[in-house]
Image (cartoon, helix red, strand yellow):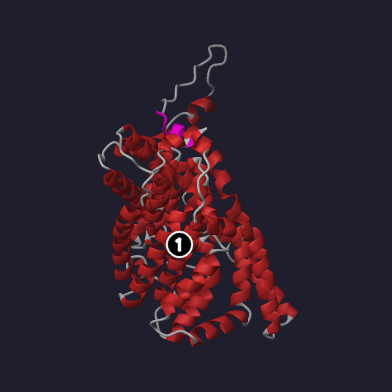
Amino acid sequence: MAGDTPVPVDRLTRFSQVIGRFIPDAMSTAVLMLVLLAAAAFLTGNSATTVMDAFYRGLWMLLPFTMQMTLILVLSSTLGSAPVFRRVVARLSRIPTTRGGVVALACFVVACLAYLYWGLAVALGPLVAIYFAREAEQKGITLDFPFLLATITAAGSVWQYGLSSSAALLMNTPGHFLEKQTGLMPLATTIWAPASLIFIGVFFVAVLIAAKFLSPSRPDPLSKFPDAYHLADPIVGAKAEPISIANPPTLSDRVERSSVPTLLLCGALVGWVYYHFFVKGAGLELNSLNTILLILALLVHRTVKNFTNALQTSILSCWPIVVMYHLYGGVAGLIQFTTVGASFAGAFAAISTRYTFPFLTALASTIVASFVPSSGGQWVIQGFVTSTAATEVGVSVQRGLLAVGIGDQMGNLITPFWAAIGAGMARIDFRRFIGYQFAYAAIWFVLGVLMFTFLPA
């Protein structure tokens, strides 16, 4: 089969394979971090009772946040499974007439999805690459499919400073775990700060420029990956189930297939959104984002039956969060409620200055992200140390939060966790494209550190 043809392994791909062999799964890593931090707590003079109490306080302090993140992932997957999205992507893929146009429009589509909500980019990004690559091939445009998949993944990195930025939304949500230390952080000081907005635009342009130089001279078109190619087959409209004369539909059947219940619920939710934003004057945070996602998911599926069927499939994608975030909370508890966090923050502040703080924070965040493939989970672990160190160095906590986002996305781009998820959706081995992501990750890191060091934040 053409898709099974051996491909020379370059240095970047070989490095990614080494990472995949030596980094354990997220749960094992979290347990290892718990053991190391507990040992550090004992070594810095904390009693066994203090360590155990800190672990227990942290273990369950994220119950609301865990459910909020679970809903974000489930509702975005439910929203992305609607056929209407595939039809829109298919129509957009017919617009470009050149290779540069295909790459630019595909990246723009994914970047917009990512800025609106990261889950949409994760769920739809591989499909965008497949539809655009298939249409390009049919037009005779030479385009390497693995390269396109890596490029749109890089473009989707803008979600870090978009409307679903986990850390920024959490810090703007009343009752967050650092509220006593930092208070609430309006989005105007984080994802809508001048440095964030400028960085998003500059990075997107940089990706398109880099793509011209990274595009392989001997491209592998989508047809060389038959499993991926067939994912873009035309969607056949769903046929209505025949009504059996012997077993006529019951009242419950009619209600489940009616759009009335979903419209009534959507009406109530829209009323809440109006009250939240225009009466209370509140801003976007995790609860309001989930409400908007729920409204959209209900509308695109139209009936309760369609929505619940999609929900049953989407719920499978959130199983790691249900337990993992509590383990991250335990890690955060050992940092925050023992002397470990203050010790780390003091040591970090001692080697930092106003101009090196963003770089060192992003570097530390990259290391943490290699083991914790979750933006929200990473901020829970790193937030206390970053906030404390920022105060001691004399920079804003917001600047520290934005620098953490740089390192977080570095980990997302250079480690196999998210690459394997996208590859699974696209029916391709992630080793075929992750090498390109190292180049885009370098661009992301350099630009991000420069922006969040010298621009207003």
Q: Is residue 325 above or below residue 382?
A: above
Residue sitting nearer the eye, 189 or 139: 139
Q: Magenta residues: mostly which secondary structure?
A: helix
Furthest residue to the right? Answer: 48
The percent coordinates of residue 453 (x first, y second) are: 36, 76
408 on left or right of 43: left
The percent coordinates of residue 20 (x first, y second) are: 59, 56
Q: Is residue 228 magenta?
A: yes
Q: Is residue 453 above or below residue 316?
A: below
Badge 1: how crowded within 10 Å, few (<14), some, or many (20+)? many
The quadrant holding residue 405 is bottom left
Quarter holding the C terminus? bottom left
The quadrant holding residue 232 is top left
Residue 148 in view in this figure: yes
Residue 303 in view in this figure: no
Residue at 43 percent across and 67 percent down: it is 406
Residue at 29 percent across and 49 percent down: it is 104
The amino acid type of the residue labelled 1 equals Gln
- According to the picture, the residue beneath numbered tag 1 turns out to be 409
Q: Is residue 195 magenta?
A: no
Residue sitting nearer the eye, 23 or 259: 23
Residue at 67 percent across and 80 percent down: it is 41
Identify the magenta region.
227-234
SS at mark 1 in the image? helix
106 on left or right of 441: left
